[in-house]
Amino acid sequence: MPSVNGSLLSDIQEVNLSYLLLAQRLLRENYAAAMFRLGFTENVAGVVLELSLAQLVKLAGSGSLVCGFRLNDYDLLSSLTHDVLGGVLQQAHSTILLAQRAATPQAI
């Protein structure tokens, strides 16, 4: 069992680092759009953007996921699984539903 737990911890750390690196990249490319996509407040976005590589690695080493999924809303999730006008408007519909949800501050 220890190897399974070690493997899970390693996977969590890998997801964390990938997420944090992606968040920084998105913030550098388009700050406002990244804040929207990530659900970050301006304060959190500023902190994440300023983290050094060493700080990112240290934060990623946490045993808990540092990212949060926003698919905990039944209406949103079901809209993603139903065909809206042959799929043409599905992405737009999902974006509108996500935009209607208040951004919850992400704790890092």
Image (cartoon, rainbow, N blue to C red):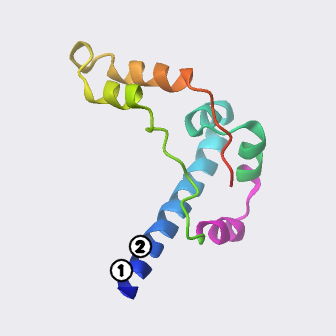
User: Which quadrant of the figure has residue 16?
Assistant: bottom right
Which residue type does callout 1 highlight?
Val
Q: Residue at x 73, y 59 (%)?
A: 51
User: Which quadrant of the figure has residue 54?
Assistant: bottom right
Which residue type does callout 2 highlight?
Leu
Q: Residue at x 53, y 55 (%)?
A: 19
Q: Residue at x 59, y 72 (%)?
A: 61
Residue positioned most to the bottom: 2
Give the vertical position of 37 relative to 92 (above or below). below
Residue 58 — which label? none
Q: Which residue is identified by label 1?
A: 4
Q: Quadrant of the N terminus?
A: bottom left
Q: Is residue 74 left or right of residue 44?
A: left
Give the vertical position of 55 relative to 22 (above or below). below
Give the vertical position of 53 relative to 43 (above or below). below
Image location (x, y in percent) of residue 10: 46, 75
Image location (x, y in percent) of residue 32: 67, 31
Residue 61 within the magenta-colored segment of the rendering: no
Q: Is residue 60 left or right of residue 94?
A: right
Calculate the distance from the C-alpha at mark 2 to the C-alpha at mark 1.
Answer: 6 Å
Q: Is residue 46 left or right of residue 31?
A: right
Q: Is residue 31 left or right of residue 68?
A: right
Query: What segment carries the magenta color?
Result: 49-60
Q: Main secondary structure of the magenta part?
A: helix
Q: Quadrant of the C terminus?
A: bottom right
Q: Residues within 10 Å of mark 1 (few under 14, many from 20)?
A: few
Mark 2 element type? helix
Residue 8 — which label? 2
Mark 1 element type? helix
Image marks 2 and 1: residues in contact by CB distance under 8 Å: yes
Residue 50 within the magenta-colored segment of the rendering: yes
Q: Residue at x 60, y 31 (%)?
A: 36
